[in-house]
Image (spheres, rainbow, N blue to C red):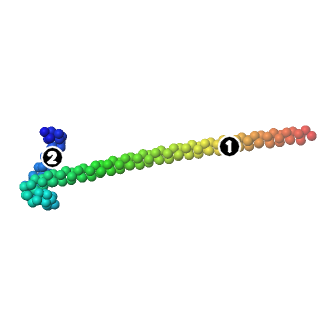
Amino acid sequence: MALNTKSASKRLSDERLYQQISDELKDNYRLDGLWVQALSETEHDEQRAKALYIALRFQYLIDEQTILDSKEQARLEEQARLEEQAKLEEQAKLEEQARLEEQEISEEQERLKKQARLKEQARLEQQSNIEKGIIIFVAIIILFLFISSF
């Protein structure tokens, strides 16, 4: 009944690993380090060593996959981190661009206000000059009338 506690995908994965080990043994492929360990732990009993080797090789393959999965997970996390960093950098770039555009608009508005003030100042100076000219003209006419009355 212990088999039923494993998930279907785990059972299929285990079967694939055992098939790989079986194929390796048929091809006389074995990891010498694991084989020596198995012989050592079974006091050189070939049958027990073979059974232990299968268990050790099975765990070795699981560990290898775990390491690969861990590296893949780390790679995916790094990729996600880099994508998030790029997204944040792009957002910061867009915010800086918007800030610069706002600054340009503000500077342009300030320039236009200054230009309007200068035009108004020039208009007022021109009006003042006209008024001064009229005053001088009136003063000359009054002076002329005053002189001509004598």
Q: Can residue 31 be seen here?
A: no
User: Closer to the camera, 45 or 144?
Assistant: 45
Quadrant for the C terminus, please: top right
Q: Label 2: how many residues lie within 10 Å, few (<14), some (14-19) or many (20+)?
A: some
101 w.r.t. 37: above or below? above
The residue indicated by pointer 2 is 14
Picture disc at residue 121: 1
Q: Residue at x 79, y 40 (%)?
A: 135
Residue kind at label 1, given as amino acid type:
Gln
Q: How far apart in space, not on screen, are marks 1 and 2 (Cα)?
A: 91 Å
User: Going 38% across and 46% down the picture, which residue do you hit?
Assistant: 87
Residue 63: x, y in percent? 21, 52
Which numbered disc, 1 or 2, marks the residue that appears first in the sequence? Answer: 2
In-image side of 127 versus 39 (left or right)? right
Of tags 1 and 2, which is closer to the observer?
2
Which residue is found at the position 30% from the left and 51% from the top?
Answer: 74
Disc 2 marks a residue whose amino acid type is Asp
